[in-house]
Amino acid sequence: MLAAAVIVFRESLEAALVIGIVAAATRPISGRGWWIALGALAGVVGSVGVAEVARSIAQLAGGSGQELFSAAVLALAVAMLAWHNIWMASHGRQMAAQAHALGSSVVRGEAALTAIATAVALTVLREGSETVLFLGGIASSAGSTRFTLAAGGALGLVAGAAAGVLIYAGLLRVPVRRLFVVTGWLILLLAAGMAGQCARVLIQADLLPALASPLWDTSKWMPDNSVLGTLLRALMGYQAQPSGTQVLFYLAALVLIFLAMRRAQSRSAHSRSAA
Amino acid sequence: MTMIVVSRTLLSLVLAAGCAPVLADEPEFTLQLREHRFTPSEVKVPAGTKVRLVIENQDGTVEEFDSFALNREKLVFPNSKGVVFIGPLKPGRYEFMGEFNQSTAKGVVVAE
């Protein structure tokens, strides 16, 4: 039962953290709860669908279908999170001022909401489809073990959701003015982590060279399956033994998105001072 | 004269392309998954070169081949194969497992 709980917890953790962080990041935008919920629901429905056809997907592209699909989902999620951050960089300051003045979620931001709803849907879909397959495997096992494993799975899901709630609650205590800076960085790290994962699956399918496997080994100090290691993996893509190309993709995403954010911010500052 | 040279070049290129799959670079190793156990549970692979690992799932449920050390994660469906490329690896031991059945499905890749 514990094994099932740990497996489902790990799968749901990243999705839960993404949801918690984007929920906090879009706090002053009206209606964001609905959009996020819709994204999560779409992700759940999508993950059941993907699990159904997972076997066929896996057989595509000479057996690399699974990796190509994962890579595409990850790349799109990175783009959505980047879009959100860039949008916030151009609108964040005025939003923070408005929210501070009006004291509630009255700001409009459909662009940001579309981006994060999509990012949420994609993350839930990716992690969820694996979970559905795992639970499906349980469903075909014997009677009493089936119940224990299902209970374990439910426990893992609750624990994952709790982590998401915790990070959301924690971020809400940050004053609105600083909130965007903090969530901006968190989302930037999430995006970089996903870019790294994208590289990893492509290396696995021999579509990218590894360059170094691994580039470093920090498993003695922070093993991947430790509590902190698991948390950092979900939050910022930490790995004890990453491939060289993976680190390259991670850094590239970090730098490129950051630069795009800075550019958007300075452009909006210029247009405001010119007006 | 030029026509003969051109057609000979083209012919050798076609033959070379046709030979390519046969002369695949990577060594290949197969793991069989039966009753949630990997056989062999210890695989010796050459270090410093890319290796093709084939996982044959002979069980009735899906398994996830998972390894932190090798940095690989792949779902392998019942009665089918999954291929992952690993390496080039430094000499050492790299543990892997079946994530959905961790108590029994485990093994190690030894690169030397």
Image (spheres, rainbow, N blue to C red):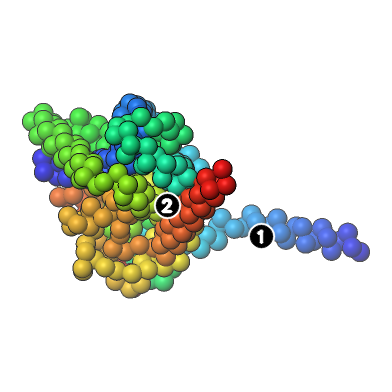
Label for residue A212? none
Q: Is residue A263 visible?
A: yes
Between the residue at mark 1 and the residue at mark 2, the CA separation in whole angstroms equals: 37 Å
Residue under pointer 1: B16
The percent coordinates of residue B49 (x first, y second) are 43, 68
| Residue most extreme to the right | B1
Residue at horizontal 37 percent and vertical 68 percent from the top: A215
Q: Amino acid at mark 1?
A: Ala
Where does the C terminus of chain A fall, quadrant-wise? top right
Q: Amino acid at mark 2?
A: Ala
Pick whichever, B100 or A42, lies toward us. Answer: A42
The percent coordinates of residue A134 (x first, y second) are 25, 37
Q: Residues within 10 Å of mark 1 (few under 14, many from 20)?
A: few
Pick whichever, A127 or B98, lies toward us. Answer: A127
Quarter of the image holding residue A151? top left
The chain carrying label 2 is A
Where does the N terminus of chain A fall, quadrant-wise? top left
Quarter of the image holding residue A74? top left
What secondary structure is found at the residue carrying circle 2? Answer: helix
Residue under pointer 2: A195
**Above or below, A148 relative to B10:** above
Residue at horizontal 37 percent and vertical 41 percent from the top: A97
**Above or below, A45 relative to B63:** above
**Above or below, B77 relative to A223:** above
The percent coordinates of residue A66 (x first, y second) are 42, 42
Q: Is residue A47 visible?
A: no
Q: Nearer the viewer, mark 1 or mark 2?
A: 2
What secondary structure is found at the residue carrying circle 1? Answer: helix
